[in-house]
Amino acid sequence: MSVLIKNGHVLDPSTGTDGIRDIYVKDGVIAAVGEKLDLAADEVIEAQGLYVMPGFIDLHVHLREPGFEYKETIKTGSEAAARGGFTTICPMPNTRPAIDSREMVEWLKEKEKKDSLVHILPIGAVTRGQAGEELADIGGMAEAGAAAISEDGKSVMSTSLYREGMLKAKAAGIPVFAHCEDKDLVGNGVINKGKKAEELQLPGISNAVEDIIAIRDILLAKETGVRLHLCHCSTKDSVDFLAWAKKEGLPVTGEACPHHFTLADEDIPCDDSNYKMNPPLRSKEDVEALKEGLKNGILDVIATDHAPHSKKDKEKSFLQAPFGIVGLETAFALSYTELVETGILSPLELAAKLSCNPAGILGIEKGSLKEGRAADIVIADTREWYRIDKEAFASLGKNTPFHGREVKGKIKYTLVNGQVVFQD
Ligand SMILES: NC(=O)N[C@@H](CC(=O)O)C(=O)O
Ligand SMILES: [Zn+2]
Ligand SMILES: [Zn+2]
């Protein structure tokens, strides 16, 4: 089985390639990359005018299975990933039961084989049942294939327990992905603390809720030497703390989510829980700091924090509805529109934040179009404006504040191991 992708604009951040090339795929592997390859293939994809990039890698998704299959399943989540150009996704462990043991990681790897269109790299919980009381079997989960550990959905509030968990992760050779939120300080907050919170008469979440834990976790990484990755950075100071950590030479990285650099709290039109997520949409000043952080490389990765919820869940008010919005099927378009169309990032830099950089954090041989690599490839058209349509999502979650928004950047093809898993 062979595929020839012809005349595409190849963006391969792993080699710096930024120009017109053909790519020849044989038996699921990239066999040749070059100008005008004269090779016969079973399938030819004409990619003139399109960008051809390494398949995107999402370090942060929620698939909801087991336990909340009415919100999303591994199958529907993987279909959403394929539609969004993601060929590898890392599901967070906050399912029921949680992914907190060797057996649960093995279960997920089995489900991947049966149900998933894309590669799944599980993230194990830090503590058993994410209860924050005793450590999960971190070494066992790593052996079974967990790519990282995280307590996402909350922070491990016991600093000494977290420190111990970090040492275990370090010994197992996997990074820690940190959701930074001071449980004491957040109270019953549901929206960024500020004018909009006052206007809607909703309890606020201050920046310090995130910042206090972000700096704590960086200091713990300094002490333990574990590789630390900050999830969904939303504040100016968390970007500054990351900059400091990098200056110190610490093994610390960070991600930003499209919603956090596209919208500010002032853009929330009314009490609409499709604008409710954790961390919340922040101030204009924070949004600018995230864009600056993405531009200067302090923020390494764009991840979605795809958090599907049912219609019923999200019909509730801002106060009552659960936190989270879907992201897999809007991430590329929002990122291209907000960051490339505006000149903040080059197309190659955007491709790096979606593929090569997350691969580096996981330490996996992906995020590259080098010969010999698995043919995980995404092909996108960025020429025309269109409106996001939540009804077209493969995800069971339609909870997005971006329905109807005008964007550029459409995924045309997604290939996993040389197989077309999505075609527009
Ligand atoms: N981001 C969210 O608002 N929600 C996430 C949890 C999380 O990422 O913290 C979820 O699981 O729904
Ligand atoms: Zn989180
Ligand atoms: Zn999350």
Image (cartoon, rainbow, N blue to C red):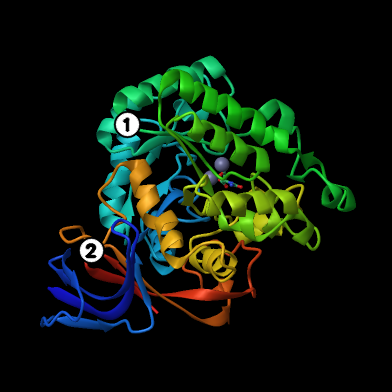
Does 165 sit above or below residue 268? Answer: above
The residue closer to the viewer here, 285 or 174, is 285
Q: Residues within 10 Å of mark 1 (few under 14, many from 20)?
A: many
Amino acid type, residue under disc 1 in the picture: Met
Q: Is residue 156 visible?
A: no
Location of residue 198 with respect to 49 vertically, above or below: above
Residue drawn at (57%, 81%) of the image = 386
Query: Which residue corresponds to the image point at 15% horizontal and 58% vertical from the top-left?
Result: 372
Image quadrant where one finds the N terminus: bottom left
Residue pointed to by mark 1: 141
Question: Is 26 placed above or below 5 here?
Answer: above
Q: Amino acid at mark 2?
A: Ala
Along the line of sight, which residue is nearer the eye, 174 or 424? 174
Q: Residues within 10 Å of mark 2 (few under 14, many from 20)?
A: many
Task: Locate ligand 2 by image quadrant.
Answer: top right
**Splitting the image into 4 quarters, where does residue 75 fall?**
bottom left
Instruction: Look at mark 2 in the image and give the residue it sits on.
Output: 375
